[in-house]
Amino acid sequence: MLKIHNSLTGEKQEFKPLRPNEVRMYVCGMTNYDYIHVGHARMLTVFDLIQRYLRSLGYAVTYVRNVTDIDDKIIERAAANGENWADLAGRFTAAMHEDCATLGLQPPDVEPRATQYIGQIIAMTQTLIDKGFAYVAHNNDVMFSVRKFPAYGLLSGKKIDDLRSGSRVQVDDAKLDPLDFVLWKHAKPGEPSWASPWGEGRPGWHIECSAMSTSVLGSYFDLHGGGEDLKFPHHENEIAQSVCACGTPFVNVWMHNGFVRVNDEKMSKSLGNFFTVREVLKTLRDPEVLRFFLLSSHYRGPINYSSVQLTQADETLLGLYRALKEAGTSGAVNAEWMGQFREAMDDDFNTPEALATMQGVAREINQAKAAGDALKAAGGAATLLAMGAVLGVLQQEPDAYLKRSVGSQTVSDADVDALLAARKAARAAKDFGESDRIRAQLTAAGILLEDRPGGATQWRRA
Ligand SMILES: [Zn+2]
């Protein structure tokens, strides 16, 4: 029996899908104006794990994860780069897809982009105006009137009166009440915009998710997820919009993942203490180490990011691959171990417990190998592989995995050869700045060069 912690009730509850054997889930995805960092990778990995586990239980899962491809940050960054906003969003969405694939994430079933749902966003905004929950402000912004929705604040545990006393009305504000939030922003000169009944403009962030989730999954669906920081105001606003527009409940179970912390602070763009996935992967034996690290803590708690923690994850994962090496895989899956693993996962996706079980299986494989019990070792390996398949780890060929060295992700042999050819060409063209740059790049990647008399260059890994 799967139990999930529901942020809405604050309790772990038995999971019952709204439709038999079907799970409809929506996760707030990325606003793509830069490369994803480890904090983003955690959110993406957590919900990838959850949809994988639900599928492993036999549910027909529809996993929707949106892309915000129009937003203040996208417009600002594009202007700073002198780049078209749509090109910028497209470029970083492609980069996110690459990073997700590297981390072993399964693509969502549906990946709606805000700019593809402008019609639905306008229709939902109009419905909210027609029903009296929203108004057109004097500057042609459309605002949601929070005080018209008395249940506002249930998810985050905030009360409207407390929120109101803590907020101030800005002089230039178009809001009738400081708590109101924008559904549709009127166009400013030079900004991308779409035609609407309220003039040219673009959607607010919150309405996107309400329009996309209910368009794809229906007005009332099973699971809605996102990072802990989205609980308020983003998810609170989604609830207000969706419930008021559709007249049904919105989401059965709300799930939120904890932050990645660096030195006890949340990893975030605004604090500048972030590490992009691309940077981190250069230091690792394999991208699987980062996935394993992210799964080694329970999804709801904070996770501390440090090279020490990554090294620990690397060593634990190496241990599991060592157990699999030469253990064979033709044995039968051990039902008792598998039951223990499922019990951990059924308990609100308790991956630390599940990974501890896997280490127990690895110890048993090692003992069986030492005792010459090939049958037991093979059974253990089959069990470990089956568990790994659920979590999206341990699916590589053990021998190949174990041969990889730390930092070997930086450059492949073919990359080194290509860079050496480019360096040779630069030297021939007397572009010594470029040849020095390539040498520095290779050195940083742990590749040592030795120029031999006659112009040949030999290399080795440090
Ligand atoms: Zn959202």
Image (tube, helix red, strand yellow):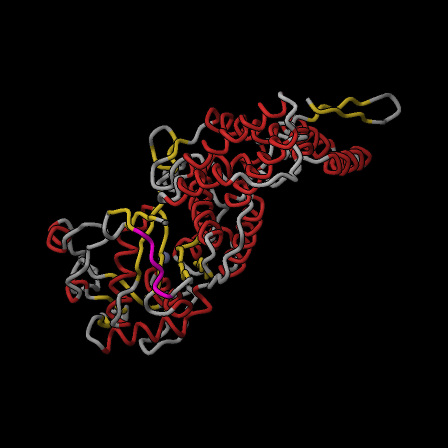
In the displayed structure, would residue 297 be above or below residue 179? above
Asked if one can make out residue 306 in the rendered structure from this viewpoint, the answer is yes
In the displayed structure, would residue 233 be above or below residue 368? below
Q: Nearer the viewer, residue 72 or 460?
A: 460
Name the residue located 44 percent from the left edge and 53 percent from the top edge: 54
Task: Quadrant for residue 124, please give it.
Answer: bottom left
Percent x, y of residue 32: 47, 53
Name the residue located 50 percent from the left edge and 29 percent from the top edge: 359
342 sits to left or right of 324? left
Name the residue located 49 percent from the left edge and 48 percent from the top edge: 34
Q: Quadrant of the C terminus?
A: top right
Percent x, y of residue 343: 40, 41
Magenta span: 14-19
In the displayed structure, would residue 264 be above or below residue 329? above
The answer to whether residue 374 is magenta is: no
Percent x, y of residue 340: 43, 38
